[in-house]
Amino acid sequence: MTTQAQNHTTPASRVAKASIDPFAALGLSKNLCSAVVAAGYTEPTPIQQAAIPPILGERDLVASAQTGTGKTAAFALPILELITDPSLDDPRGEVRALILAPTRELAAQIGQSFETYGRFADLRTQVVFGGVKRSIHERALRVPPEILVATPGRLLDLMSTGDVDLDCVEHLVLDEADRMLDMGFIHDMRKIMAALPQDRQTLLFSATMPAEIEALAKRYMHKPARVAVAPVSATCDPISESVYFVHASDKQRALTALLADREMERGLVFTRTKHGANRVASRLDRAGIPAAAIHGNKSQSARERVLAGFKDGSIRVVVATDLASRGIDVHGLTHVFNFELPNEPEVYVHRVGRTGRANQPGAAVSLCAADERPRLAAIERLTRTKLQRLDERPLLASVPAPEHEPPRRQTPRRQPSRRSRSSGGAGGRQRQPRRRSSRR
Ligand code: AMP
């Protein structure tokens, strides 16, 4: 590996190269541009265009961006640029950038991204999260990594025993800040921020901007630049969104029919509960559609195995709870299925954001039972999109009801309402620039 310093260019030469390389035009040096090309990117995404220049200018930043927009590179690339700047001290030997993420999967993914983009730089990235033996992290942190990606709970734990030293942190990223808030990490986030050097750059990425996040920005950030690329309420453009109105007891059959479609290359099915994820996956298996379940009750190694299989294409269908929805970034994920609609409409946006990533086309198909109608209405209000209504009858007709399933009860009280079926119908309804030198 070469060091970043060897290939740094002057600002003037960067501008000259700008006409050829759109990443260089943003102020990134040669090594990072090469790493980006090696990752297969040709153009910066809108969040990268908007966020990279102010981050390189060492401003604090509040970015309103959902997953799938390329937001990880939007902060990872300029951070790598800043910490490998050859005019500064040797970057090695201290934690210089700290990234906080809500889930293990997202943390692991961010760690991978830093390794991908920083492949030409001689830097270490370490990821720490709960569910892994603490002693493994203690050992790994004995030689401080320059980039530390962490979930808040495990980080606080390691801080409390002095196993991690954050005195030299210059860049802090709060990724998916709204999700950290939802998951009850607000106090942990505050404690961590209070323990970091004040003279640092803080970058906050969030799909939504609830009042608590704004308060956090106000309290801990200095005149942040603000960028917003995709409003919270908008799912990504190239995604087609549709819904079938089916009775709850017909959902498994409808899903089997949808997954049997050869055009469905790789699909992620969302259920609301862990138990539901296991049940749906094993019924799919029995119907001849191999599927793996992923949720919080699975061991870390089992989750990683499933994610690896999903990414390399050996697993075609994964059934997941929402915990997994933030961390899954699978290139070529063509379909997201909502086996059940989520209680909160924002969760729908995040689920759907797993497909159609980096402007690839994707489809999001929801199965809506009669009692889920209010949830559908809330989703359509939030996204200001009317999901396309599809006719469930040909779908259900293509998969016979399994013989081993007990016949439906005939008692009127338990009999499934037919309203949900008839309502579906065929398609008709339709801070000032930081003085880094002061730290040295
Ligand atoms: P993120 O929003 O960071 O989770 O990124 C979503 C996906 O977009 C990931 O698979 C990235 O590898 C990919 N990606 C990020 N930046 C670009 C780019 N400039 N061009 C193409 N794909 C990208």
Image: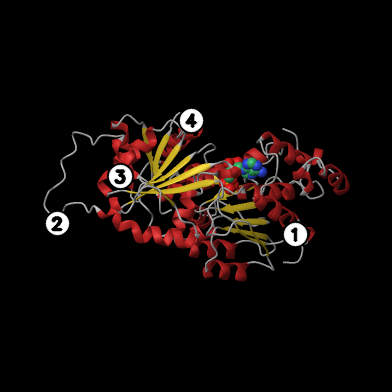
Read off the residue under disc 2.
Answer: 413
Q: Is mark 1 within 8 Å of ligand 1?
A: no
| Marks 3 and 1 in Cβ contact (< 8 Å) | no
Read off the residue under disc 3.
Answer: 251
Image height of 240 relative to 196, above or below: above
**Horizontal arrangement in the rendering, residue 10 relative to residue 380 (left or right):** right
Mark 3 Cα within 10 Å, few/some/many (few <14, many 20+)?
many
Where residue 141 appears, x then y in whole percent? 57, 45
Furthest residue to the front?
A: 428
Marks 2, 4: nearer the viewer: 2
Residue type at mark 2 is Arg
Mark 1 Cα within 10 Å, few/some/many (few <14, many 20+)?
few
Instruction: Provide the secondary structure element on which disc 3 rests.
Output: helix
Mark positioned earlier in the residue sequence (1 or 2): 2
Instruction: Provide the secondary structure element on which disc 4 rests.
Output: loop
Q: Quadrant of the N terminus?
A: top right
Q: State the image quarter where residue 50 is shown.
A: bottom right
Read off the residue under disc 4.
Answer: 313
Residue at coordinates 29% horizontally, 52% vertically from top-left?
Answer: 422
